[in-house]
Image (cartoon, rainbow, N blue to C red):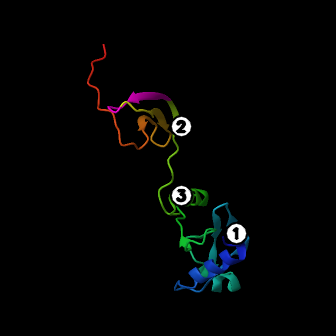
Amino acid sequence: MRTAGQAREAAVAHLAMSEVPAVLVDSNTEEFDAGWVFYYQSAHYVVTKHPGDMLVGNAPIFVARNGASPVFISYHRPTSESVEAFVCRGNANAAPNPEVELLGWRVRSRCPQRRQYESALLLAWQPQRKQWMLVCLAPRQECKPKASRRRVS
């Protein structure tokens, strides 16, 4: 696990690979449970404060606590979404994790070998898509029931 100081050093090293000399703006650093988001600016701008020396469109750097390599993250969404994507998917630039509200019931089935197992059918509301989905969550087992073709009147 990285400390804040080690994360800052990793961000500086990552920033050193860029073509433009830049420095971290420590006052804007954000800390999350999963890591830190560092912002930076042109070293020349920090000295002169002239708007013409300012970097524009510079993506912040995310440094994970778990030791993963620092990455530039999108500035087109809140940094908290990028951190959540890292937590859920292991990639700070992945699509955000969709929120799903689950409402459901349990179904008991019998397999041909007479072993019972449970699976869950869930009715899931996806706020981003504004639609309901039916999701079947069944445990991995050697025995799976055959689909029933009975008519329901």
Q: Quadrant of the C terminus?
A: top left
x, y percent for residue 76: 52, 61
On whether residue 110 falls in the magenta region, the answer is yes
Checking the image for residue 28, the label placed there is: 1
Helix, strand or loop under label 1: helix
Which amino acid lies under the numbered mark 2 shown in the image of this protein?
Answer: Glu
**Residue 62 in the figure: left or right of residue 117:** right
Viewer-nearest residue: 73 or 138: 138
Reading the image, the residue beneath label 2 is 101
Residue 12 shows in this picture: yes
- Quarter occupied by residue 32: bottom right
- Distance between mark 2 and mark 3 Cα atoms: 18 Å
Which residue does the numbered mark 3 point to in the structure image? Answer: 85
Given this view, does label 1 or label 2 mark the residue nearer the observer? 2
- Range of residues picked out in magenta: 105-113
Asked if one can make out residue 57 in the rendered structure from this viewpoint, the answer is no
